[in-house]
Image (cartoon, rainbow, N blue to C red):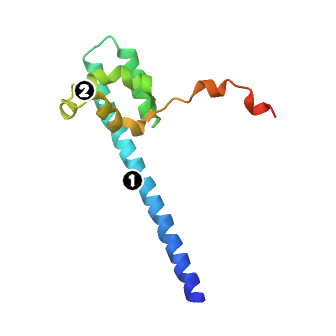
Amino acid sequence: MRSKLDDLIKELKMQVMSEFSNENKYQILKRSLEIQLIKYLNKYLKKNFNMELVFHSIRKTLKKKEEITEKQFESIIKFIERELPFRGETRNRIYNYFSPVITTKRDRSSDNSLEQFMD
């Protein structure tokens, strides 16, 4: 009985450690994507495009380790798709690549309903 309990505890420890490892890998991936986007935004800011305020806003958000909105990403994807690593890729594939740093919109129609208060 004691050995079964020890085996179960050992198995649970392994599962927890695996989950921590996976979460840590995801955070590392997310941070590397943020850094990559910041690098591109710095490059675009040096070129004095008319979208300087947009670039600054997105860069500020990424530096705070926060996700950017879909709309913000849509405003810079036309520049990103011209970068060497992304040439020839579809916008959908580029979006999927950066998806860990892009927040998805909530369905606003469900937020504006009083259904949750009615019984």
Q: Which quadrant: the C terminus?
A: top right
**In percent of the image, x 38 and y 26: which residue is there?**
73
Task: Name above or below for residue 36 compared with residue 13.
Answer: above
Q: Position of residue 91 (x, y in %)?
A: 29, 28
Could you tell me how far apart the alpha carbons at marks 1 and 2 are, in whole angstroms? 26 Å
Task: Name above or below for residue 14 compared with residue 66.
Answer: below
Which residue in the protein does label 1 denote?
25
Q: Position of residue 27 (x, y in %)?
A: 42, 48
Classed neighbour count for the residue bearing mark 2: other residues with Cα under 10 Å, few (<14), some (14–19), many (≥20): some
Residue 81, numbered circle: 2
Task: Name above or below for residue 10 compared with residue 110.
Answer: below
Of the residues shown, which amino acid type is indicated by label 2? Answer: Glu
Furthest-right residue in this view: 119
Q: Which one is nearer the viewer's eye here, 102 or 90?
A: 90
Secondary element type, mark 1: helix
Q: Position of residue 20 (x, y in %)?
A: 47, 59
Residue 59, numbered circle: none
**In percent of the image, x 51 and y 71: which residue is there?**
13
Q: Position of residue 78 (x, y in %)?
A: 28, 21
Q: Which quadrant: the N terminus?
A: bottom right
Classed neighbour count for the residue bearing mark 1: other residues with Cα under 10 Å, few (<14), some (14–19), many (≥20): few
Circles 1 and 2: CB atoms closer than 8 Å:
no
Of the residues shown, which amino acid type is indicated by label 1? Answer: Lys
Q: Nearer the viewer, mark 1 or mark 2?
A: 2
Secondary element type, mark 2: loop
